[in-house]
Image (cartoon, rainbow, N blue to C red):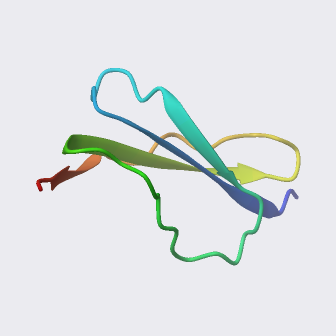
Amino acid sequence: MAELAGYVISYGQNPENLDQKIYVNDAYVMEYTVDGLSEGTWYFSVQAEDDNGLMSPPSDLVSKTFQS
């Protein structure tokens, strides 16, 4: 049976196209801060990846709006 290897955080400003990705190669990480986001609404989804490279279905989208 495969073990959890890490996570992929997909994000972007278009909920239909999360065009940026962060690979977290540590199964024990429970939080992550995405730096350098500009103003506007950003959408995020997370997938788990096992040590065979298989991915879970994406999580539900969450969003955060940044204003200056």
Q: Position of residue 12 (x, y in %)?
A: 37, 34
Q: Quick check: 68 above or below 53?
A: below
Query: How many circles with numbers are drawn on the protein?
Result: 0
- Residue at image point 88% right, 58% down: 1
Q: Position of residue 31 (x, y in %)?
A: 51, 74
Q: Pick whichever, 62 or 40, lies toward us.
A: 40
Residue 7: name its quadrant: bottom right
Query: Is 43 situated left or right of 6 in this image?
Result: left
Q: Quick check: 34 above or below 27?
A: above
Q: Position of residue 22 (x, y in %)?
A: 61, 47
Query: Is 31 situated left or right of 68 in this image?
Result: right
Q: Position of residue 28 (x, y in %)?
A: 70, 78
- Residue at image point 83% right, 63% down: 3
Q: Pick whichever, 43 or 65, lies toward us.
A: 65
Q: Quadrant of the C terminus?
A: bottom left
- Residue at image point 30% right, 21% down: 16
Q: Residue furthest front?
A: 68
Q: Pick whichever, 17 or 68, lies toward us.
A: 68
Q: Quick check: 13 above or below 64?
A: above
Q: Residue furthest top?
A: 16
Q: Quick check: 44 above or below 18?
A: below
Residue 25: name its quadrant: bottom right
- Residue at image point 57% right, 39% down: 21
